[in-house]
Image: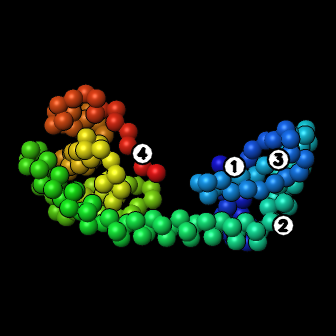
Amino acid sequence: MQEIVINWVKIQYQIRISKRSKNIKISINSGWELILVLPKKWFFQSQKRLIQKWEEFMKQKWGWILKHIWKTIKFKLWDDYEDYIKNKEKAYGLVSEKVKYWSKKMWLSYNRIFIKNQKTKRWSCSSKRNLNFNYKIIYLEATEQNYLVVHELAHLKYMNHKKEFWDLVCEILWSEKYRKYKIKIK
């Protein structure tokens, strides 16, 4: 990802090289990322001149970029927010049930459970012994849900990802396969 600052707003964009394109173009992909399409012939110019042309073009298209990116972000945020409101209580019920079950098996106590709509850190355990989960946990399979709950509960004992932490997670879940579990939520 490249970055440019225009009118104090930081914009991230990807660069794609096109053999067919004759001019610089801007588009927005389905993930509402800004794509800067450059003709292949432009890459024979000096790096300094190429950067100048990109920046000039981005500044010329500033209004279009702002209008289209904001529109897509606004719709995306609204869709996520509506889904969050609709499913927050369902997620809380599911998570609280699983946390109660697994915390008893692990002999660990926790403070509170929070269901959030985080964009980056999707689950966490705070130093106050609070457990935070993304509402989208309801869309995962039961084994993935159990793994996430056990993972966060294990942080109540070990606030790191060292060997002792993973030993506890694997001991509770009875399997080494969980050691390499990676959960991705779109």
Comparing 56 with 148, the one in front is 148
Q: Which residue is mark 3?
A: 38
Q: Who comes first in sequence, dot 3 or dot 4?
A: 3
Q: Mark 4: which secondary structure?
A: loop
Colouring rule applied to residues:
rainbow
Q: Which residue is mark 2?
A: 60
Which amino acid lies under the numbered mark 3 shown in the image of this protein? Answer: Leu
Left or right of 50? Residue 166 is left
Residue under the image location 65 percent in, 65 percent down: 69
User: Taking 66 as reference, is 164 above or below it?
Assistant: above
Q: Which residue is mark 4?
A: 184
Q: Who comes first in sequence, dot 2 or dot 4?
A: 2
Residue under the image location 15 percent in, 37 percent down: 172
Quick check: marks 2 and 3 in contact, CB under 8 Å?
A: no
Left or right of 153? Residue 14 is right
Q: Position of residue 68 (x, y in %)?
A: 69, 67
Q: Which residue is mark 1?
A: 14
Q: Who comes first in sequence, dot 1 or dot 4?
A: 1
Which amino acid lies under the numbered mark 2 shown in the image of this protein? Answer: Gln
Comparing 46 with 174, the one in front is 174
Q: How many marks?
A: 4
Q: Position of residue 140 (x, y in %)?
A: 33, 47
User: Taking 183 as reference, is 3 above or below it?
Assistant: below
Residue 9 visible to the viewer: yes
Q: Local crowd at mark 4 within 10 Å, few (<14), some, or many (≥20)?
A: few
Q: CA distance from mark 3 to mark 1?
A: 11 Å
Which amino acid lies under the numbered mark 4 shown in the image of this protein? Answer: Lys
Q: CA distance from mark 2 to mark 4?
A: 37 Å
